[in-house]
Amino acid sequence: MMNTSVIATVPPRVTLVAVTKTLPASSIVEAYRQGIRHFGENYVGEFEKKYAQLPKEIQQGATFHMIGHVQSRKIKKVAELFDWVDSVDSVKLAQKLDEAAGKLHKKLHVLFQINISGEAKKSGFHHVNMLPCEHIPYRNMSVEGLMTMPPAVTDPEGSRNIFRSLKHFSETVRKKQPAIGSVLSMGTSQDYQVAIDEGATMVRLGTMLFGEREKKSNL
């Protein structure tokens, strides 16, 4: 059963992305009926099957985000299935997504993933000069802003400095690259209220909306 009371805790200025990975298509339908329009998925094959089960109203009216790592062999399918790719973590991936979107005559919305915490196991850009905007003339992508994933925490306050740092990073980036949008995607079920305090314009909620999954997730 979906926890609909959580929706009211997200201000109207902040986009709520319901993370529906590993959940059935019926969870998307239920959330859509509650007014949610943005949905995040991690697994391309799983989402392709799920998408086919959705009513046309939702296929056309919802916005679907790829929030997981994009494998090279699945770039074409990602560009086909998703409206947003929230995890662009390399120049090579950005270029290939732009090419794939062009072949589909489609405009993709993307976020650059920033590794603010500097964790070796996490993907993402570490420095403003690494961002690819100056090097690739994107024709089929709109770079809407930045996203980050902080380390797992037990106390939401443990993420505050990460979110504050991304906000400052974003301000620096936009001075150098005005074409990059102002979206800041940061905050999950573990810390989204702190993220909103620090300027998030988009949060990703899974557990808070749908409860624990069979395979636990920080989302």
Image (cartoon, grey):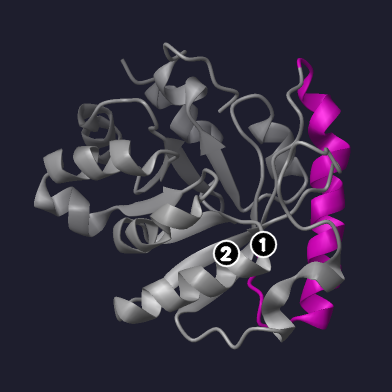
Determine whether label 2 and label 1 are within 8 Å by CB. yes
Q: Residue 65: x percent and y percent?
A: 43, 51
Q: Residue 128: x percent and y percent?
A: 84, 68
Quarter of the image holding residue 133? bottom right
Q: Residue 176: x percent and y percent?
A: 82, 81
Is 49 displayed left or right of 174 in the figure? Answer: left
Disc 2 residue type (three-letter): Leu
Q: Is residue 176 magenta?
A: yes
Residue under the image location 48 percent in, 33 percent down: 8
> Residue reaching furthest front?
73
* Residue beneath disc 2: 93
Tell me the tag on residue 90: 1
> Where are the magenta residues, as a range?
154-182
Against 137, residue 92 (above or below) is: above
Determine the main secondary structure of the stretch shown in magenta: helix
Depth order, front residue of 57/104:
104
Q: Residue 109: x percent and y percent?
A: 48, 67
Image quarter where the C terminus lies is top right
Distance of mark 2 from mark 1, alpha carbons? 5 Å
Q: Is residue 21 magenta?
A: no
Q: Residues within 10 Å of mark 2 (few under 14, many from 20)?
A: some
Against 122, residue 25 (above or below) is: above
Disc 1 residue type (three-letter): Ser
Q: Secondary structure at mark 2?
A: helix
**Taking the image as drawn, is residue 46 in sight?**
yes
Depth order, front residue of 97/158:
97
